[in-house]
Amino acid sequence: MPDRFFLLLGAMLCFQVTFAQETQQIYLSGTGKDHTVNWDFYCSGGHNSGKWTTIPVPSNWEQQGFGDYNYGHDKIKATEHGIYRHHFQTPADWQQKAVNLVFEGVMTDADVKINGKSAGEIHQGGFYEFKYDITKLLRSDSANLLEVTVHKMSANAGVNRAERNGDFWVLGGIYRPVYLEVKPLTHIDRVAINAAANGAFTLQAFTTLLPKGYTLTAQVSTRDGKAVGSPVSVSSNGKQEYTLQQQYRQPATWSPEFPHLYQVTLQLKQGNKVGHSITQPFGFRTIEIKPHDGIYVNGARIMFKGVNRHSAWPETGRTLNKEISLLDVNLMKDMNMNAVRMSHYPPDKHFLDVCDSLGLFVLDELTGWQAAYDTVVGRKLVKELVIRDVNHPSIVFWDNGNEGGFNRALDGDYDLYDPQHRPVLHPWERFNGVDTKHYPVFNYVVNASLYDQDIYMPTEFMHGLYDGGMGAGLEDFWNQLLFHPRGAGGFLWAFSDEGLVRTDKNGIIDTDGNHAPDGIVGPHREKEASFFTIKELWSPIHITLPVISTGFNGRIPVENRYDYTSLAQCSFRWALARVPSPQKNNTADTIASGTATAPDLAPGTKGFLQLSLPDHWEDADILYLHAYDPYGREVITRSWPLQSPAALAQRELHINDNNLQKTKKTATHTTIAGDSLIVHHAGIDYYFSQANGQLLQLLTPKGKISLGGGPVLAGTKQELKQFTPATNGADYTIMARYEGNGFLQVKWTFSPGMPVRLDYSYSFKGESPFIGITFRYPEEKIKGLAWTGQGPYRVWKNRLKGQQFGSWYKAYNNTVTGESWVYPEFKGYHANVYKATFSSEEPSFTFYTGNAGTFLQVFHPQAPAIGNQKTAPAFPEGDIGFLQAIAPIGNKFHDAAQMGPQSQSNIMLNYTPVSGVLWLQVEK
């Protein structure tokens, strides 16, 4: 690897010196997690310590098997340091160049030497880019030696409080790229741009000391190089800072919906000779906080639909690459997010580049997890943060710390380096006219809507520990934020589970118990159910039609919740589908499809989308509607069942077919064996307890089915009051009535040539986390579940949105959300189930439902190893349930009942008894 690197470096130098007027970047390390360069390395303590070896750079040394692991909450932390050595050569003509050594990120204190001499003061702060001018330290006649001593824990107590005691993994190493930045001796150091939405353009250029006779010329162009407007110039005057201004007519502005980017090329000339040139991308964009009103970008009032993101990947820690940045931003865009908060530190530069190009608002953050840097170090780090990131149009706020980690002496420092004067926030605090209170209960948002005069934008809410929070309860919160006259949206916690592959624990993925499994997606970006709930709730194309009813004429109410986009710029496709036959293994069979003309609705307006459906469309089972943004990204998919559950059951079971299997009809008869009443029906024996009236088991020609223990009324104690087997013509029936808190009445009907039918009705008093009937079945026998209904993920009472109607299958798993990441989870509540087939070690069995809106309970989700009762909703004692109502889920900090109307317990509707029908079909 090192020999190949020297050859590559030499080739790059020979090529690049011919373009000496441009800044050169010569990497001494690799560029990311999948492209590294081996350096010599010595670790002082922990694993693989006390010896010289090599390590890939960039990397966190723990992920390469060195040192020890710590999470920020650990009271005692490892203090190992690492020593890096690397040789590199430079050409002779670099004696006429200025050379900076740039580190994009080192954790935490970095002591840098070139050829045995100090490159400058020790850098403290693990999340910031820093550089040294090493021009005078380089040798051109022999290899240069770079030595870096990296201390995982800082010598500065304030740095440790701000960075190393946070609620995230604390790692060590040179984890971001290292390169040489080569410029002419007289050069442009950097630029800072303020490009307003009205076309006003200001560029601050920072240079080496320029005597008279030099000119700085700026030319704006599109990203493909087409000149925009005329160039603007300024002559040198013996200073190091220059301002160039221009006015552009009606530029295409930058926003998440239309992330238009330009670039400016700045040339430093002496006469007609270009001595140095740099090109900087930027966007025309204006942000404004209007006190007691809202947050405006380019004149539009914004609702931030955001999430907090850690920079992490399981195998490589905080060493990432652009592909991961693209993956993450695309996942956020797929959820219809328009914003991301950098929690709790600045990200990789390529992440901001992707936010610029694909379109996401960014809150860029100075680290300070509940404790702040001291002022001396903090001032240096604010400067490094802003200077690096100032020209990204995606960045609309600077966060000066988090949850009390605010050094208020630094609030004014951001403006020193930012000509846009972006607003500064104190996430968690009321500051600068914005209340950012974290993790509010629902009533807080209600009261803020009624009484508060400040803008409300929680920079953390709906904590996503395990399967709680996130999409669960979000609909109530979001509707209340939309109602808030000064609401500005909010930022969910968090984007992904921060799980690390532990090199010291045989490669397990560790989230430090319940500290870090907080994400909408897993460590490798596995999607949880909330991903799809958020996507629907935050869709800018808001479709409100709840059901397709008789007389539907193809008109669908729609609301445009975009900030800048007309719905006429979007596209729509519809499809009619049939539920596949039981022998097929696909979600749905499309029988017709087409497009719909997008209505010309401006942002914030409502109207109708007209579908031109074919004749007899109502014979289909499902209507799908897909909406796409102007770039072809799917914004939302909605699905509506067009048939009732009973209609599907009748079609597949031939319930009303009088010619069904006439030759196979045999009379139903019964026998008694001890306490059991055995019903012999169609070659299957159904065992019932005469003591409690419950089904006990089934015997088929292929073997036993251990389905029994029901039906019982979930969550209540009932006593059998009546058990009445009877013959009614060709039918045999069993009626049972139970009383206690309310009642349960069931009727089993065995008809020749027909599947077994179960009619039930019940009522009870009071509140309950669930309402319905259940059966028992041994979980250890189950292999899989195929069902028609909403899917493929489970639901909670306060997380019903986002799933699609169709036919689904999933193999058994015992997934604990945030621990094993095999999704969708097998166990839990499933919505609007029409039929469900359970496959197991025994013969399979299928339930068909006769009632719309039936929830299917599938066993009991296993509790996490380190539990949290707020995220452990109640389940009936039974294993398989057919329910009218299900439990909500809370989040890390709050019980469900604090999270809004949908998160409350259940009650009977006007105490009217619930009636339902099930059909049971058994594999023979």
Image (cartoon, grey):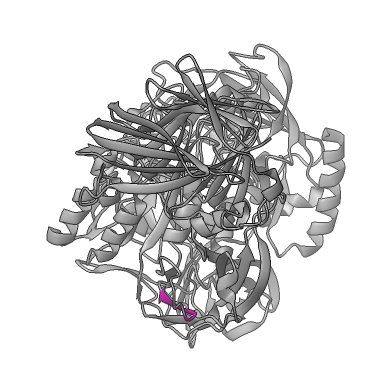
* Viewer can see residue 664: yes
Residue 891 coordinates in the image, percent (x, y): 34, 38
* Identity of the residue furthest to the front in this view: 729
Residue 159 coordinates in the image, percent (x, y): 40, 32
Q: Is residue 371 left or right of residue 245?
A: left
Residue 216, quarter of picture: bottom right
Magenta stretch: helix, strand or loop mostly: strand
Q: Is residue 358 left or right of residue 195?
A: right
Relative to 119, say whether 237 is above or below: below
Q: Residue at x 49, y 30 (%)?
A: 169
Q: Residue at x 71, y 31 (%)?
A: 56
Residue 625 coordinates in the image, percent (x, y): 55, 69
Relative to 119, say whether 449 is above or below: below
Task: Pick the residue in front: 441 or 663.
Answer: 663
Q: Is residue 910 left or right of residue 347?
A: left
Task: Pick the residue in front: 617 or 527.
Answer: 617
Q: Is residue 504 left or right of residue 203?
A: right
Residue 85 coordinates in the image, percent (x, y): 70, 28
Task: Pick the residue in front: 581 or 16.
Answer: 581
Image quadrant holding the C terminus, namely top right
Whether residue 709 appears in magenta in the rendering, the answer is: no
* Viewer can see residue 769: no
Q: Residue at x 71, y 65 (%)?
A: 21
Look at the image and give the residue range highlighted in magenta: 553-559
